Image (cartoon, grey):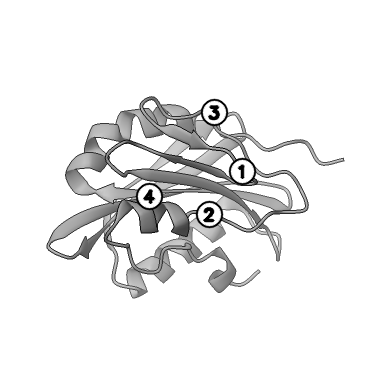
Amino acid sequence: MDAKRLRPRLPALPASAAVLALALAVASCVTPGPSMARPAGFALFEGESYRAISPEGVAVGVRLVANDPEQGLGFWAEALKVHLLKSGYRLLAEEPFRAVLGEGTLTEWVAPVGGEDWVYLTALAVRGRDIALVEAAGPFRLYREHRGALLASLASLSLPERR
């Protein structure tokens, strides 16, 4: 898998919550995707992919990416980091996290949208041929209000067992 396939679905953060929610929608997958507990205060959308949004418009999505060529967490975290830095995102924070799925890497980015800064969270966890990718975004102030709920639900990130 090349770095372009791991590229986030949000090349530039949208200005409205409705556009952001649509950007987090993903095409249906043949294999069941990752799951995560709904963050407190968020509404979960029914559908083929995991999407949730807060009343103010902070959105979160979870999707499955093929680990092709098969590499470890460090490789994909660095590939995503290099790509986003080259795309103009500013690194805000980077830390490991532990989930049901296993060890992961969480990175928070800042990018301007109109006249305000938005935070864009990316979190990766790798298991065999699968990468679980979590993306969340919202205006800085609103994101910070929901950060605790997002991190708490991230701990429940899991993948179905392959048959």
For the N terminus, the quadrant is bottom right
State the residue in front, 61 or 107: 61
Q: CA distance from mark 2 to mark 1?
A: 9 Å
Give the residue drawn at x 78%, y 36%.
161
| Residue holding disc 2 | 25
Q: Say which amino acid is labelled 2.
A: Ala
User: Which secondary structure lies at badge 1?
Assistant: loop
- Residue furthest out toward the right: 163
Task: Give the quarter of the image for residue 42.
Answer: top left
- On screen, residue 131 versus residue 62, left or right, reads right
- CB contact under 8 Å: marks 2 and 1: yes
- CB contact under 8 Å: marks 4 and 3: no
Q: CA distance from mark 3 to mark 1?
A: 19 Å
- CB contact under 8 Å: marks 4 and 2: no
Mark closest to the chain's N terminus, 1 or 4:
1
User: Which secondary structure lies at badge 2?
Assistant: loop
Task: Mark 2: give few (<14), some (14-19) or many (20+) Cα within 10 Å.
Answer: some
- On screen, residue 162 versus residue 114, left or right, reads right
Task: Mark 1: give few (<14), some (14-19) or many (20+) Cα within 10 Å.
Answer: few
Q: CA distance from mark 4 to mark 3?
A: 17 Å
State the residue in front, 127 or 37: 37
Mark closest to the chain's N terminus, 2 or 1:
2
Which one is in front in this view, the residue at disc 3 or the one at disc 2? 2
Mark closest to the chain's N terminus, 3 or 2:
2
Give the residue drawn at x 50%, y 32%.
98
Mark closest to the chain's N terminus, 4 or 2:
2
Q: CA distance from mark 4 to mark 2?
A: 21 Å
| Residue holding disc 4 | 107
| Residue holding disc 3 | 156
Q: Which mark is residue 47?
A: 1
